[in-house]
Image (cartoon, rainbow, N blue to C red):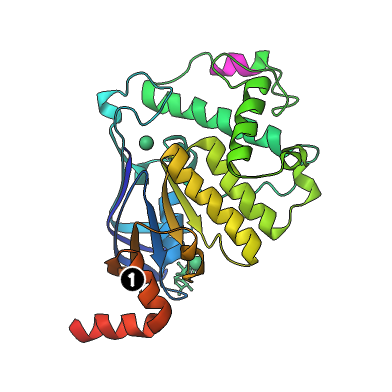
């Protein structure tokens, strides 16, 4: 079981005299659980997700972001090295964090001419696996040579599989399996990235990409925004499948309680002014629906 841990995280906008936004965020998200991160607009939810991702717009001024791994966290890794158990994510690049099992929304490749979703996803999976193995087991000295052999200079998306890569046929099978579990239409995968996806389809792609990459922890920021009820239910079904079928831990960031009717959280964290000020189970989200964030503010500042 992997655990993502934020300890007393303070962060500011990364510019001279930049505004302090996070004032001591504590969170612990284990794989296999759904955690809702709620709070009014401007409370620091998206900044928290970007700190986890390693977004360059913010500096962490105090505190830690750690990823704890255990033997068995990667199905295809026989033995996890002792020195690969705890990672200080703040020292790692965004793609390295992703390689170790942190998924941060869909890096939506809006305009890649002539690349289908299926090819994009296969490339993303292989890149992740290669980076992960480098981090866990050290440099792959053959990597550069392999890339030349594969003709990657001309077409990174269409090259034949390197040793250890997921090949076209194998990937097709994996994708079909995942799409079936998510109740997605297979024609989706053959669409071209530059042909455009609707808002709702992008959200479903976000879940599909997480299903393919099998992260330990997925951070989904406002994935419910702008979805009609049918699409919301489809997306919710996918999120539940991430947890139930591949043991992914979910940090579900949302302003509204609505999606939590379909994705029941194991734990709810409420942010206010850059801090997590209240925590509870699914019932807390329902209370919030009735009483609003003013109630939280009153509770917190009266007892403080
Ligand atoms: P939430 O996602 O909870 O609505 P955010 O994390 O997006 O909140 O923002 C928290 C606060 O930090 C807001 O007041 C916002 O205006 C400010 N903020 C966030 N990012 C930046 C930035 N890059 N530059 C300046 N202010 C920022
Ligand atoms: Mg936000
Ligand atoms: Mg696991």
Task: Tell me if the residue at label 1 has its CB under 8 Å from ligand 1.
Answer: no
Q: Is residue 32 left or right of residue 152?
A: left
Q: Is residue 39 left or right of residue 146?
A: left
Q: Is residue 27 left or right of residue 121?
A: left
- What residue is shown with label 1? 284
- Residue 70 sits above or below residue 24 on the image: above
Under tag 1, what secondary structure?
Answer: helix
Q: Quadrant of ligand 3?
A: top left
Tell me which corner region of the image, top left, top right, bottom left or bottom right, holds residue 271: bottom left
Q: Position of residue 262 (x, y in %)?
A: 50, 60
Q: Position of residue 257 (x, y in %)?
A: 46, 70
Asked whether residue 54 is in view, the answer is: no
Label count reads 1
- Magenta stretch? 143-147
What residue appears at the point 57 percent right and 48 percent down from the top-left corner? Answer: 207
What residue appears at the point 35 percent right and 63 percent down from the top-left corner? Answer: 268
Tell me which corner region of the image, top left, top right, bottom left or bottom right, holds residue 118: top right
Query: Is 92 a magenta residue?
Result: no
């Amino acid at each position: 079981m992997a655990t993502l841990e934020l300890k007393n995280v303070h962060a500011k906008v990364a510019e001279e005299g930049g505004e302090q936004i996070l004032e001591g965020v504590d969170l612990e998200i284990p794989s296999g659980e759904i955690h809702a991160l709620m709070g009014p607009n401007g409370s620091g939810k998206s900044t928290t997700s970007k700190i986890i991702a390693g977004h360059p717009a913010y500096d962490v001024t105090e505190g830690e972001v750690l990823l704890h791994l255990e033997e068995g966290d990667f199905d295809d890794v026989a033995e996890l090295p002792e020195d690969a158990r705890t990672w200080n994510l703040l020292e790692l690049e965004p793609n390295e964090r992703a390689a170790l099992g942190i998924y941060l929304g869909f890096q939506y490749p809006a305009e890649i001419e002539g690349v289908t979703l299926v090819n994009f996803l296969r490339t993303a999976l292989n890149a992740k696996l290669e980076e992960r193995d480098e981090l866990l087991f050290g440099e792959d000295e053959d990597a550069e040579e392999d890339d030349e052999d594969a003709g990657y200079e001309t077409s990174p998306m269409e090259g034949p599989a390197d040793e250890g890569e997921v090949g076209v046929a194998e990937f097709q099978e994996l994708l079909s399996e995942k799409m079936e579990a998510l109740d997605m239409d297979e024609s989706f995968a053959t669409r071209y990235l530059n042909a455009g996806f609707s808002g709702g389809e992008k959200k479903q792609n976000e879940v599909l990409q997480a299903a393919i990459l099998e992260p330990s922890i997925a951070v989904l920021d406002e994935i419910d925004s702008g979805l009609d009820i049918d699409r919301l239910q489809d997306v919710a079904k996918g999120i539940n499948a991430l947890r139930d079928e591949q043991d992914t831990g979910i940090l579900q960031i949302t302003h509204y309680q609505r999606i939590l009717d379909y994705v029941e959280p194991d734990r709810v964290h409420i942010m206010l002014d850059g801090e997590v000020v209240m925590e509870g189970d699914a019932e807390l989200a329902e209370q919030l629906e009735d009483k609003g964030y003013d109630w939280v503010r009153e509770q917190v500042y009266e007892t403080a």
